[in-house]
């Protein structure tokens, strides 16, 4: 996994004039909502509630995109595509695991780069 | 100028609110479509921004309710990840005035909002 490409805050810096308080707030929000998504996604997939999984994934993508987390976004877009079309369902567990690994890594990187933004 | 913004994606909500506050607008936020309708029924806004796919009531349903039941002609900007022509057409048919696709550039949002509020004056 390429650490350098896990996030890019160019958009947030641009929109906030590099306001450190705002950037930390966004990172803190990501650290709250991303694990919540993972818990929901795993449960919904286990319950085979594919439509709800699609909606939850759809909801998370724009925020992830604004954080420049391209690798996570790409996995999420595949989950959304497969759940919408109800195809390649056997790959979804692999994608959820991949998102889990990347989100965990990204949170570690944010903690390192932003001294544990709360 | 008062703006109501209905959005269930908290990251996107924070970004848009920051942009609006920096432009000097007073922003009220809600997290779902039903709360949006209740807020519109009790307060007056200069602009309403609606996410398309929200819990309880979609952006389509909110704008349709505003136009048909409340006879409320406040300008409505729809924000959505869906760039499908069908969604855009449905939003305009329901009564939306403009549409922006997520993720968007900050300038794009600012231009649309400024234009919509200028038209209202």
Image (cartoon, coloured by chain):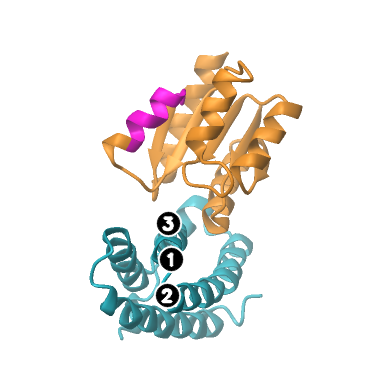
Chain colours: A cyan, B orange
SS label for mark 2 = helix
Marked residue nearer the N-terminal end (1 or 3): 1
The rendered magenta stretch, by its main secondary structure, is classed as helix
Lateral position of residue A65 relative to residue A43, left or right: left
Estimate the x, y position of residue A41 in percent, counting from the top left. Answer: 46, 73
Using the image, name the chain to which the residue with label 2 belongs.
Answer: A
Farthest-out residue, right: B42
Residue depicted at 31% across the width and 83% down the height = A94
- Contact flag, marks 2 and 3 (Cβ < 8 Å): no
Badge 2, how many Cα within 10 Å: few under 14, some, many 20+? some
Q: Nearer the viewer, residue B24 or B66?
A: B66
Residue linked to disc 2: A45
Above or below, comparing residue A64 to residue B57 in the picture: below
Residue linked to disc 3: A62
SS label for mark 3 = helix
The answer for how far apart the CA atoms under marks 1 and 3 are is 16 Å
Viewer-side label of 2, 3? 2
Marked residue nearer the N-terminal end (1 or 2): 2
Badge 1, how many Cα within 10 Å: few under 14, some, many 20+? many
Residue A17 seen in the current view:
no
Above or below, comparing residue A114 to residue A78 in the picture: below
Residue depicted at 40% across the width and 38% down the height = B100
Instruction: Locate residue B3: give its quadrant.
Output: top right
Badge 3, how many Cα within 10 Å: few under 14, some, many 20+? many
Q: How many marks?
A: 3
């Amino acid at each position: 996994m390429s650490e350098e490409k896990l996030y890019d805050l160019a958009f947030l810096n641009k929109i906030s004039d590099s306001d450190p308080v705002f950037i930390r707030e966004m990172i803190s929000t990501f650290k709250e909502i991303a694990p919540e998504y993972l818990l929901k996604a795993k449960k919904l997939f286990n319950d085979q509630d594919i439509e709800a999984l699609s909606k939850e994934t759809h909801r998370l993508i724009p925020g992830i995109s604004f954080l420049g987390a391209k690798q996570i976004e790409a996995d999420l877009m595949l989950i959304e595509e497969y759940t919408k079309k109800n195809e390649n369902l056997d790959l979804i567990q692999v994608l959820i695991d991949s998102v889990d690994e990347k989100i965990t890594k990204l949170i570690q990187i944010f903690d390192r780069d932003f001294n544990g933004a709360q | 100028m008062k703006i109501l913004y209905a959005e269930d994606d908290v990251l996107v909500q924070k970004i848009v609110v920051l942009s609006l506050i920096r432009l000097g607008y007073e922003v009220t936020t809600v997290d779902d479509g039903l709360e949006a309708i209740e807020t519109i029924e009790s307060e007056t806004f200069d602009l309403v921004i609606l996410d398309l796919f929200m819990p309880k009531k979609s952006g389509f349903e909110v704008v349709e309710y505003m136009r048909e039941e409340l006879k409320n002609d406040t300008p409505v900007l729809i924000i959505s990840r869906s760039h499908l022509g069908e969604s855009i057409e449905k939003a305009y048919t329901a009564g939306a005035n403009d549409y922006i696709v997520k993720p968007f550039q900050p300038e794009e949002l600012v231009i649309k909002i400024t234009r919509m509020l200028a038209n209202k004056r």
